[in-house]
Image: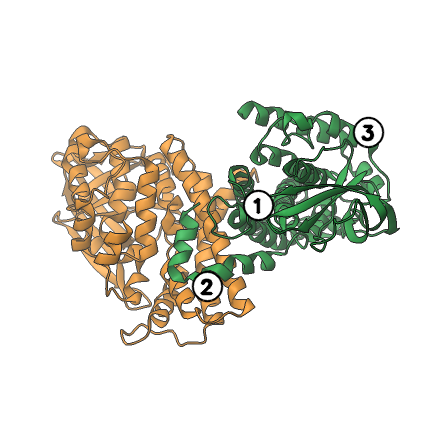
Amino acid sequence: MRAFLVEELAGFPARKRAYTWTGWDAAFTRKVAARGWIGMTWPRRWGGHERSSLERYVVLEEMLAAGAPVAAHWIGDRQSGPLLLRYGTDAQRAAILPRICRGEAFFCIGMSEPDSGSDLASIRTRAERVDDGWRVSGTKLWTTGAHHCDYMITLVRTSQETSRHAGLSQLLVPLATPGITIRPIRDLSGNEHFCEVTFEDAIVPADALVGEAGNGWAQVMAELAYERSGPERYLSCHPLLTELVSACRDDTGGRTRIAIGRQVAHLATLRAMSIAVASLLDAKENPALEAAVVKDLGAVFEQDLPGIAQGLIAREPRTDGTADGFAQALGELVQNAPSFSLRGGTREILRGIIARGLGLR
Amino acid sequence: MSDVRDMLEATVARVFTDGVSPERIVEAERGGWLGALWDATESNGLVAAHLSEESGGAGATWQEAAIVARASGRHAVPLPIAETMLGGWLLERAGLAVPPGPLTIAPLPLPADAFGDPTLSVRLPRVPWGRHAKHVVVTAPADRGIRIAIAPTGTVVALGYDLALEPRDDLALDAAPITVGDAGLPADVVTLYGAMLRSQQMAGALEAILDLSVQYANERVQFGRPIGQFQAIQQELARLAGVVAEAGVAASAAARAASDASHPVIGLVGAPGDPTFEIAAAKVVVGDAAELGPRIAHQVHGAIGFTYEHRLHFFTRRLWAWRAEFGTAEVWAERLGTPVLAAGADAIWSLVTAR
């Protein structure tokens, strides 16, 4: 793997390595797929490779550590595929999973909306049963990669119930469906990673339903454990740590050694915690609480690094290609760091989950 | 080996829950020796579990024996439990007999020629539990590995205390008879394994302050409801739970690495089969948690937690004392960071994934 990454990423600039799992490159994804590194744990029957989850974990962390542009297959491999494996029909699995494994079907996650961020159960995007399927109307927001993707697993309200958590369902929506408009949104660094996706009476087929109608909340919560505990929750800044060590190579001052050593200690521990959650997922447990702990700790760790790096190396953060690698990685990550405790569940929501797990009433 | 683990878990729960109370800890802080609790601890095999059966132990690994050290921190047990565990292990590694009774260790190695005579005359500063221990284990560097000696504890020349009022006494050995053996261990083995054991105790004390804080937040009513219902408190306690969990994982990794260590341990970060990486990482992570953890616990407890009457301080004062012992977080961070910087950027990832 390391040899593959060295070869494929030769000359890949630090600025782009700093995107890590938000860097989009479909051609790279197909090369990864050809190596059998997508859908690694899935059954052969569905195009998977029946490898262990630890082997998959190693592949993921090597990609992230190298700053490889993995966004095209990341979400399908991490959560949309596993969701279909768990709740999908055989027809859905047969149609979709082999294409994810070949690097030919890309997924995004349709959860947040303009008026529903942390309060996910308040979503208003609706799907009604009609003769030829489901009629979907509403708006999804902050949908990472939608402008490049083929499918969105969309959380919709399919009925009004007394409990807010009831009446939600998930639909497998082909984004080429008429009535769907995708508008990329520039983020503060000028990049276009996330999108607004509007549904204006878009008709998706009846067999687009994933799992049971009305079971959407439970399905989404299970999916979030995959989303929150992986190595991307503490390795987003790893390319900066690598650049920092290179930049500090001749600096043997105690302050530098202490700062680097401290990062390494926490990195190794977070990795052990994340791997432990992966084993729980493997054992079909639902480690939602443990995943929230990993993501919250990981975000603090990742967000600390740009400031630590700036404190050790007095160099201007820049994002232009003429800057050195350290300046580029710093320039990107200083700007991206605020998103680490927003995406995939805000810090406040995660800590609320942890507090409930502690038995605070 | 999981039956050893279950047995140890059950025994520490019984012995420490029954035997440790705020009154007993106060008694120890006033200079008392909790003889009955020590006898229960020793007779139940807790301080010798990790020794071989020939030495009176149960052949447990460090990973299993760490249960005892962690529980001693979780209950703030005012006895030389970690010290006796470490002393016994050093003696066994040097092929020496392990005597009954509380042991302690000299924190710093003596000069290389210290054990040339059959007797030893030396002053040992800040020896944990020096006044109560029957024997002290002393180390000195040798050409290959170290020499390890055991001596009667001699005379207490200065009574000292750490922040938790646990004894840290200056001992004077005056022509004390010593028994000496050799072991393939690094010169700073007491610091290394002391850090491993203090990390377990600190992880246990951190669990205790989390439990106390959650319990208090559910009981203390202000503005007409338990303060644990306020999001401001919930967010702080969730943060505390995170660092406590991280500390527990780091401490466990250190104990496992000590169990898996292939010999000789040379105390070098990155050396194959050497537990130094994990022990260093543990003391860093646990030390950092000992900074943030007590802050949050005290904040949640308010003024009552700042009184001597409340038991929170038995744990927070231990955390403040222990984080400075056997190397602060910064000392161990530097030990991790030095080889990383020397080896370059790629070394970080290889080091971390070699675990």
- Check disc 2: other Cα within 10 Å, few if <14, some if 14-19, many if 20+: many
**Marks 2/3 same chain:** yes
**Subunit of mark 2?**
B
- Shade representing chain B: green
Is residue B152 in view?
Answer: yes
Is residue A158 in view?
Answer: no
Q: Secondary structure at mark 2?
A: helix
Q: Is B1 rendered above or below residue B209?
A: above
Which residue lies at the image location 86% right of the left edge and 43% below the top edge? B31
Residue B28 location, quadrant: top right
Q: What residue is pinned by disc 3?
A: B36
Looking at the rendered structure, the number of numbered marks drawn on it comes to: 3
Q: What residue is pinned by disc 2?
A: B341
Between A11 and A336, the residue placed more toward the observer is A11
Q: Secondary structure at mark 1?
A: helix
Q: First in sequence: mark 2 or mark 1?
A: 1
Badge 2 amino acid = Leu
Q: Is B279 rendered above or below residue B74?
A: below
Between A27 and B198, the residue placed more toward the observer is B198
Which residue lies at the image location 60% right of the left edge and 59% below the top edge? B331
Q: First in sequence: mark 2 or mark 3?
A: 3
Badge 3 amino acid = Ala
Q: Position of residue B188 (x, y in %)?
A: 63, 52
* Mark 2–mark 1 CB contact (< 8 Å): no
**Marks 1/3 same chain:** yes
Tell me how far mark 1 sits from mark 3, CA to CA.
Answer: 31 Å
- Mark 2 or mark 3, whichever is nearer to me: 2
Q: Which chain is orange?
A: A
Q: Is B26 rendered above or below residue B287?
A: above
